[in-house]
Amino acid sequence: MKAVWLDLVSRRIVEGDVPEPVLESDSQVLIRVAETGVCGTDRELAAFRFGEAPPGETTLIPGHEALGQVLAVGAGVANLKPGDWVVPTVRRACVPPCRACARYRRDLCVSGGYAERGIFRLHGYMAERAVDYADDLIPVPEAIADLAVLAEPLSVVEKAIEKAVRLHEEGVGRALVLGAGPIGFLAALALQIRGIEVAIHSAEPTAHPKAAKVVSAGIRYCAALNSAEAFDVVVEATGSAEAAFAGFRHLGPGGIYAVLGGGVGAGHISFLDLIRNNQIVFGSVNASPESMALAVTDLARLDRRVLEGIIRRAPLADFRRTIFDPPRDTFKLVHVMPG
Ligand SMILES: [Zn+2]
Ligand SMILES: [Zn+2]
């Protein structure tokens, strides 16, 4: 079958044929990969800044944001049948499982021995077909299959927002999202459908096509923020430590600060202010199967027109251009698999 892979020794991106995956257990499912989304993680992988091949191999098939359609199921699979649409979760348990992995919360793995499809120690979905355990696949209603490639990035946001809203003791009225990338835009949409007044603050000028899309979704867009403005929740999705520290100044009393991008860099947060203002700062990575299921539910609730405007599709053969030079007006580039 056709696939794209990273040769981690020669540091080349290769397109070619790889062996077909086969069912090795009654609990597994063979899927046709229909679409694979590209994100900043894939760009880091393609620049060979991180990533790890499966044990004993020197290549890694990237792609962790996927939409699949079931081709065949093992004898022990009851909840899926050929033709069903699914989105795979990314992380797989450490072996033997730690206390978090044992209760199916691989996103909270404490041993660090987990694997991630398309990132660490497992091949991803930039291939025509893949095999997964049924438990690692979240079913998707046919009516939103064309949007479901957004489920993985949305799940990252769902986990953080659920936690921020749960931790805020007075109820969240106003939220600020830092960064107008796919994660930032999806975070704003997920906050908006919870009845929270939301603004996005990002470096792009208000005339930028991404800013226009944010505004047309009914979300306030600020290229500059009034220094006195404070929010109950701030979601950082910039990938910049400098922006993350600057955004902290807009966290109100009792506020919750969710760091999703961060980046490497030093800055200053006053512990004294943190204490006086009863504030909480937390980081959040990856997503649980529950967050993935919540993302699928929310995709059906969100404005279809807005979600369609987030996605731009390209053939797999374009992967070099899309990875290294993504179109500036596009939030989520999605590769359509040839199979
Ligand atoms: Zn991603
Ligand atoms: Zn674990």
Image (tube, grey):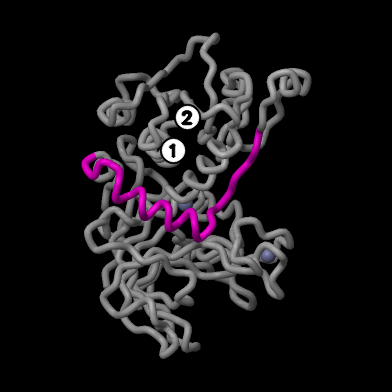
Looking at the picture, which amino acid does disc 1 mark?
Ala
**Residue 268 in view (yes/no):** no
- Marks 2 and 1 in Cβ contact (< 8 Å): yes
Residue 260 percent location from the top left of the image: 56, 40
Question: In this rendering, would 3 be left or right of 135?
Answer: left
* Quadrant of res 128: bottom left
In the image, residue 321 lies in the stretch drawn in magenta = no
Report the amino acid beneath label 2.
Val
Image x and y of residue 8, in percent: 57, 64
Residue 44 position in % (x across, y down): 53, 50
- The label shown at residue 187 is 1
Is label 2 within 8 A of ligand 1 (CB to nearest ligand atom)?
no
Determine whether the residue tagged by mark 2 lies in a helix, strand or loop: strand
Reply above or below: 85 against 224.
Answer: below
Q: What mark, if any, has residue 177 been given in the picture?
A: 2
- Over which residues does the magenta segment extend? 281-305
Specify few, some or many for label 1: CA neighbours under 10 Å numbering under 14, 14-19, or 20 or more: many
Marks 2 and 1, the one that precedes in the sequence: 2
Residue name at image x 36 percent, y 60 percent: 36
Image quarter of the C terminus: bottom left
Q: Does residue 54 sit above or below 301 in this rendering?
A: below
- In the visual, does 82 lie left or right of 192? left
Q: Which mark is residue 292?
A: none
In this picture, is 248 found above or below 189? above
Q: Is residue 297 left or right of residue 168?
A: left
User: Foreground residue, 145 or 240?
Assistant: 145
